[in-house]
Image (cartoon, rainbow, N blue to C red):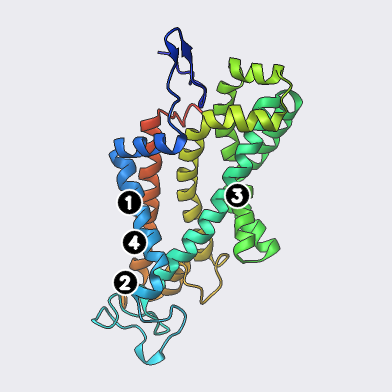
């Protein structure tokens, strides 16, 4: 069976009349999700995190950054289900609000990363020649440096803050996205519908938007879910090392860093954010793996 995809949005014709138009990407995605149990479970876990993060002010009566020294280092109780930290702040409240920070920064960084990586990868595949060579050699140079080292250099030079973290994540992750998207686009570029578009005189951007992107949208979606899980871990790692969120921001990595010295006294102050981080990463990975298998996306072959 051929691995070449039929161009999306183009309905073949026959002697009996035009064939029905294929359903849109949203409808196909929904059918794919429903047919994959790991994808359903993963997306359900992520959805719970999103809902909890959005409803955090309604789920807890405490403020995430306001503490009470007289209630420091308390164990779980009816008033504080996960106890309090060394500053007397409710741990569960900070975990709930920490999901807001993790989702906000991670989604923003991942969207920018996927957008830049998709455009560069498709452009390199479409144009080929010297542009492809230059782009790939630059990316190889960036990928040869450990990701955490690049992140630390950027945040050390530019300071902390959400915008700097987003920039650092983009620098680290865009090369990986470019390689994956370029690999998928290279299988589409030789197809007849792309050749016909070029013969009509359409520009690179028009071909990318109308012919290439619709036929690699499954790869881009899987890459978004997989890359988001890495971004969440990188952001939490930076905060744990003291280069991410500034205190008293409710951030999971920062919470673990602040409370690790008191883990024998109030273990939930460190375990609760770890559980939040782990469940979100597991959900994103399940969603990515489920979609990848359902769509038949071979991430190893495509350069990851």
* Crowd rating for badge 3 (residues with CA inside 10 Å; few <14, some 14–19, many 20+): some
**At 45% from the left edge and 74% from the top edge, which residue is drawn?**
258
Query: Of circles 4 and 3, which is in front?
Result: 3
Residue 44 image label: 1
- Image-based side of 277 in relation to 154, left or right: left
**Residue lying farthest right?**
130
**At 41% from the left edge and 65% from the top edge, which residue is drawn?**
53
Q: CA distance from mark 1 to mark 2?
A: 25 Å
Q: CA distance from mark 3 to mark 1?
A: 24 Å
User: Is residue 206 visible in this depiction of the protein?
Assistant: yes
**Residue lying farthest bottom?**
70
Q: Could you say which quadrant of the image residue 189 lies in? A: top right
Regarding mark 3 in the picture, which secondary structure is present there? helix
Q: Earlier in the sequence, mark 2 or mark 4?
A: 2
**Residue lying farthest top?**
15
Regarding mark 4 in the picture, which secondary structure is present there? helix
Which residue, given by chain and number where applicable, does mark 4 sit on?
Answer: 275
How far across and how far down the image is residue 36, in percent? 31, 37
Q: Earlier in the sequence, mark 4 or mark 3?
A: 3
Above or below, comparing residue 167 to residue 22 in the picture: below
Q: Could you say which quadrant of the image residue 291 lies in? A: top left
Regarding mark 2 in the picture, which secondary structure is present there? helix
Residue 112 image label: 3
- Image-based side of 266 in relation to 65, left or right: left
* Crowd rating for badge 1 (residues with CA inside 10 Å; few <14, some 14–19, many 20+): some
């Amino acid at each position: 069976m051929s691995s070449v995809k039929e161009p999306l949005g183009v309905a073949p014709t026959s002697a009996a009349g035009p064939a029905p138009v294929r359903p849109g990407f949203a409808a196909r995605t929904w059918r794919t999700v429903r047919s994959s149990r790991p994808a359903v479970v993963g997306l359900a876990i992520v959805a719970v995190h999103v809902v909890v993060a959005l409803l955090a002010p309604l789920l807890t009566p405490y403020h995430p950054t306001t503490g009470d020294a007289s209630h420091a280092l308390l164990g779980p109780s009816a008033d504080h289900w996960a106890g309090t930290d060394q500053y007397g702040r409710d741990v569960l409240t900070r975990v709930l609000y920490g999901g807001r920070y993790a989702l906000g920064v991670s989604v923003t960084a991942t969207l920018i990363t996927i957008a830049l990586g998709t455009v560069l990868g498709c452009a390199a595949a479409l144009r080929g020649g010297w542009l492809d060579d230059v782009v790939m050699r630059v990316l190889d140079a960036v990928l040869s440096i450990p990701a955490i080292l690049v992140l630390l250099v950027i945040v050390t030079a530019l300071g902390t803050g959400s915008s700097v973290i987003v920039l650092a994540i983009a620098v680290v992750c865009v090369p990986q996205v470019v390689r994956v998207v370029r690999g998928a686009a290279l299988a589409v570029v030789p197809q007849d519908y792309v050749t016909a578009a070029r013969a009509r005189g359409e520009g690179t951007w028009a071909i990318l938007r109308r012919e290439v992107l619709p036929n690699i949208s499954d790869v881009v979606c899987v890459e978004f879910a997989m890359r988001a899980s890495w971004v969440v871990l990188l952001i939490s790692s930076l905060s744990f090392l003291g280069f991410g969120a500034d205190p008293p921001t409710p951030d999971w990595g920062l919470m673990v860093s602040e409370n690790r010295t008191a883990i024998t006294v109030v273990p939930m102050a460190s375990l609760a954010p770890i559980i939040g981080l782990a469940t979100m990463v597991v959900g994103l990975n399940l969603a990515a793996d489920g979609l990848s298998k359902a769509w038949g996306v071979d991430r190893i072959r495509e350069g990851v």
